[in-house]
Amino acid sequence: MARRDNGTGILPDSVEDIPPDLAAVCMYLCVTIAAIFLPGIRDTPIRVVLGLPFVLFIPGYAFIAALFPESNTSATDAAADADPSPNEAQSSDRDVESVTTAIKAESGGIDGIERVALSFGTSIAIVPLIGLVLNFTPWGIRLIPIVVSLTGVTFLLTFIAYHRRAALPDAYRFRVPYRSWIQAARREFLEPDDRADMVLNVLLVCSVLLAVSSVGYAVAVPQTGESFSELYLLTETDDGELVADNYPQNFTANQERSLTVGIGNQEHTTESYTVIVLLQRVNISNNSTTVLDQQQLQRFHADLEHNETWHHQHTIAPPMTGEDLRLTYLLYKDDPPSQPSTDNAYREVHLWITVSEPS
C-alpha cells in the first residue's frame, strides 16, 4: 500500500499505512482479550459488553474486508475521506474529477449497509465452525481455546484484508467514510431544515440513549435467576483428578478412606454453610426408612460467595460395622439443629457402604 504522509513521524511507515478500520479491529481484539482474562475486569459487565461484538461482528467484518477490499462509496465520500496532505490541500477541481472517474469505474465493491449486514451474518457462521473444529481437538470447546482460535482467525483475515487492499490502486481501496458521516450528522442535527426535523432529531437521540441505557442496565444488573445450593461427593483418581465416580463401598472399621465433599453456592448472596457427616444404621420397610443407630463422624464449615465452589478432602474411619450402612452428608445454611437428620437438612447425599471388622 502506498505510504500516506500524515506528518506524525511517530510510528513506522508500515504501521501508519494500516487502514484505520483494520487497525481498530486489531486494537479491539487486544482490549477484549484483556477484559476476558485480566483479574478485576473479567468479572465485570465490561467483559460482556466487549465480548458480544467480539463474537457477533468482528470476525465477520475481517472476513468481509478480506473478501471485498474494493470501495463502493461515492466520489464525494472518497474525496472527503482521503487522508489530506499538503499537495492534496492545494489540489484543483480536476483532482476531484479524476477521483470521481476512478470510483465510478466497475469495482465490484459493496456499500456500507451490505458490509455491516454481511459482517453479522458471516460472524454467526464463522464462530460455530471454529467451535465444531475445536470439538474434534484435544482442547475441546472451552474458553481459552475459543478465544485463542477466534483471535487467531480474525488476525489472519485482517492481515489478508490489508494486503488485498494494498494490491489495489488507491482510488479503489475501501475506506470508512467517517468524515462524510460526521458532516452529514452535523448538518442533520445542528442545521435542521425546519422545526419538525429538529423535533424528530431530538426524539431519535432520546430513543438511542434510552435503548443504550436499557441494554447497559440489563448487562450491569442481570435478573436474579433460580437460587439453589449444591452438595456432592467426589473421589480422586490416580492422576489427581476429582471425579464423581468410583466411590468406596467396602470399609474396615476404624481404618481411613479418603473422600472429597463439595459445595456450590448459586444463592445470589453470600452464604454460611455447615456440613455434618453421619454414619447410620437404618431399616427400610414398606418404602419407609427408620434410623436405628447413628454416629456423627465429622463437621465442616464454609463461607461462600455467590457462584463460588468449595472442595474439602477428608478421611472417613467408620466406628460401627455391618452391611448396608448409610454414610450421610447433611448440608445446612447457618447453624444446624441439635438433632441433625435428613428431614431437617437443606441438602443431603449419601453412600451405602459395608464396614467389616479388621482381620
Image (cartoon, grey):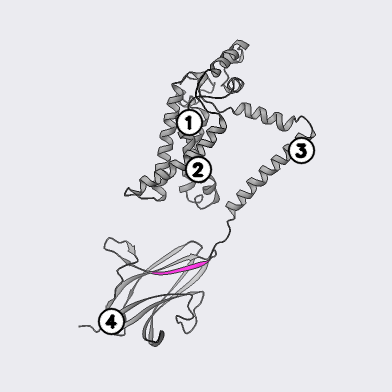
Residue at (66%, 27%) from the top-left corner?
Answer: 183
In space, the residues marked 2 and 3 are separated at their CA atoms by 34 Å
Disc on res. 65? 1
Residue span colored magenta: 227-232
Could you tell me which secondary element the residue under label 2 belongs to?
helix
The mark lying in front, picked from 4 and 1, is 1
Q: Which residue is mark 2?
A: 56
Residue at the spot 43% in from the left edge and 35% down from the top edge: 155
The first of marks 2 and 4 along the sequence is: 2
Foreground: 177 or 119? 119
Which badge, 3 or 1, comes first in the chain's sequence?
A: 1
What is the distance, in whole Å, between disc 3 and disc 4 at their CAs? 83 Å
Q: Which residue is mark 3?
A: 199
- Asked whether the residues under the numbered discs 4 and 1 touch, taking CB atoms below 8 Å apart as contact, a structural biologist would say no
- Residue 164, given in percent of the width and then of the height, sits at 43, 25
Q: CA distance from mark 3 to mark 1?
A: 37 Å
* Residue underneath mark 4: 355
Kind of element beneath mark 4: strand
Q: Magenta-highlighted stretch: main secondary structure?
A: strand
